[in-house]
Image (cartoon, coloured by chain):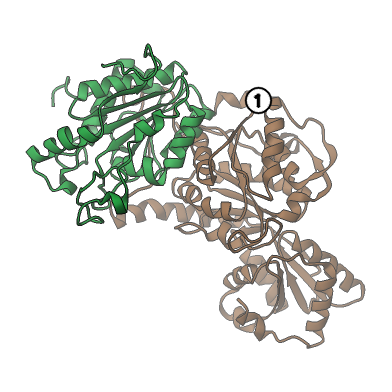
Amino acid sequence: MINQPVVQEEKLLTRPVGEEKRAFMYGNEVVVWAALAAGTEFLFGYPITPQNEIMHYWSRLAPRYGRGFLQTEDELSAGFAALGGIMTGARCFSATAGPGTVLFQEPLSMAEMMRIPLVLVVQQRGGPSTATVIYSQQEVFLTIFGGNGEGLRVVYSPGSHQEMYDFTIKAFATAWEYRFPTLVLGDGYQAKMREPVTLYDPRKKGIDLKPPFPLVGLKGVPGVDREPAHWRNAFSVEEELFEALKPVIDDFHRAAPSLSEKEEGFPEGAELIIAAHGIVGRSVRAAVRELREKDIPVGFFRPITLRPFPDKDIKNVLSACPRLLVVESAQGQLAKLIRIAVGGELEHALKMYAYFRPGLGITAEEVVQEARAILSGERENEAAMSLF
Amino acid sequence: MSEQSMPLSWRTETKPHKFCPGCGHGLVLKALGMAVDRLNIAERVLFGCDIGCSLLSWDFFNLDTVQTHHGRTVPFIVGAKRARPHLVGIAYMGDGGAYAIGVQHLVNATMRNDRILVIIVNNTTYAMTGGQMAPTSLPGQKTETTPGGREPHQEGYPLRGPEMIASFAPGGAYVARGSVSQVQRLSRFLERGLENQLQDRGISVIEALSTCPTNWRTNAVDTWKYLEKEMTEYYPVGELVSPWKSKAGEANRL
């Protein structure tokens, strides 16, 4: 009953992106084109830097393609309004950053409990608190494990505008197929820089964007033609909650292997693996390439999904080379995820080095320098463990 | 219960309901059920309920229903209504949800004149959490967090929600206060609120004065006295803003 597609879907066939085309644009603009191309009906948003241009572009483009926009009174409202829209069967999304991501934990936790396919784009800014409006990678834990619950979310960390486009579209596909809230974790640098990107119609690429379906507002008189749709997230006793939550957790873990994604480079014969995610992954990729050209045996690993984490892949890489440098614009948030993923005996065998620059950008030159220092024995690996 | 006394939109499978004996929620929901029946709109209604005692209405009706978070029922219903305007959105919440933790949503939805009906059940306390002071607790009222009685010098005066909303409600809005001591009249207010939405005029905000003998620690006689005397004196019952009124500020006595 709940899987009946919405008639509205056909209305969205006015394709914002017809033929594949090359463009040069801001990351925030890329997000908007991706959401339009994915057939998203509504953006509910509240201003916070550095994601504002998502609302700016959307509010200009949405009317052209029959989509809706509402600037709400805060992020709580943006999140809950999106949940309301989604439950009626409309693809809706929002975008936020920093303290806005904190407020978004409330609607996200409702989405986890009730399996509501909420899509949220986060453009990280400096933290804690108001900090900077510019850049960081400090919202990793917040996007993954924020909220009172179990982190039943999918989090993509794109590393280029092309990936921003690809994974924003994919976020809608994932959210509606698996019915878990899905986040695209960008950052202020990606949001505000321009670079080339290829825009395409996902349907022409064979990307399976299942039609959205309503959970409420169903056809027929409730109680006469059909049962009423009753949705709740409050339970009377512990056992009642456990019974409701266990299948959700099981579903998440069952889906995890098919959801997790990563990028690897030069793992063969590596004596040091350098791990990074998002935009920092670009610096690491460039650094590793440069070092390999000089026959210095380093490899890199970039988780694309931070949740579910590509556990098996990183275990395989680190089993072959148990020496790891984690590079991130945060104080070890990615490093902690890796330690959790690795676990067990491998964790004890692992020599872990850290290059943590909370709120700072990281260049390929810095990574090259750091990798050289480690390989020449100038760095203490134990220090990484005490830096968290 | 006879057929006449139970609205058709009520779900018999979940009756008797889960509210305490003497609680006013059942009466507010009866008034609402009668209004929904009269307008014959069950297929179009999306009923949202808040946290606190109002959440116990999550399976109360034969209406599509979503229980949301504390204070967030208004934006949830706003989003649903914006996405699917043919639905009739009802946000059902307590005074804490509407006037404290979610007051920004109520104020902004009113400013935007969102086409939804907000029902606020005012029982002068946070009942589900055990009887703490609410924005609506009366001066001198003893609660778990004002054991000596609410002292306006320290805790302020109680909020008259509909009056606040009426002070800036845009044209087309409908604002009223009813009471569970006058169920038929409350039901007519609710019907007008729904009609206002059906006619795409504006927001409808209706407060219902209600009872909480469990937390008030009152017997039947004192419960009713508190509702009809103390509460009604501070919170006058009637329509405050109505598109059907002949002149602004002149209450149309139903």
Quadrant into which the C terminus of chain A falls: bottom right
Quarter holding residue B154 = bottom left
**Left or right side of A87 for A358:** right
Quadrant into which the N terminus of chain A falls: top left
Q: Nearer the viewer, residue B24 or B234?
A: B234
Q: Which residue lies furthest to the right in this view?
A: A294
* Residue, disc 1: A66
Q: Which of A346 and B121 is in front in this view?
A: B121
**Left or right side of A385 for B56:** left
Q: Chain A is drawn in which colour?
A: brown
Q: Can residue B11 be seen in this view?
A: no
Q: Position of residue A302 (x, y in %)?
A: 72, 63
Badge 1 element: loop
Identified at 86% across, 68% down, the residue is A289
Residue type (three-letter) at the residue carrying disc 1 = Gly
Quarter holding residue A148 = bottom left
Identified at 26% across, 56% down, the residue is B145
| Colour green, chain | B
Q: Is residue B108 visible?
A: yes
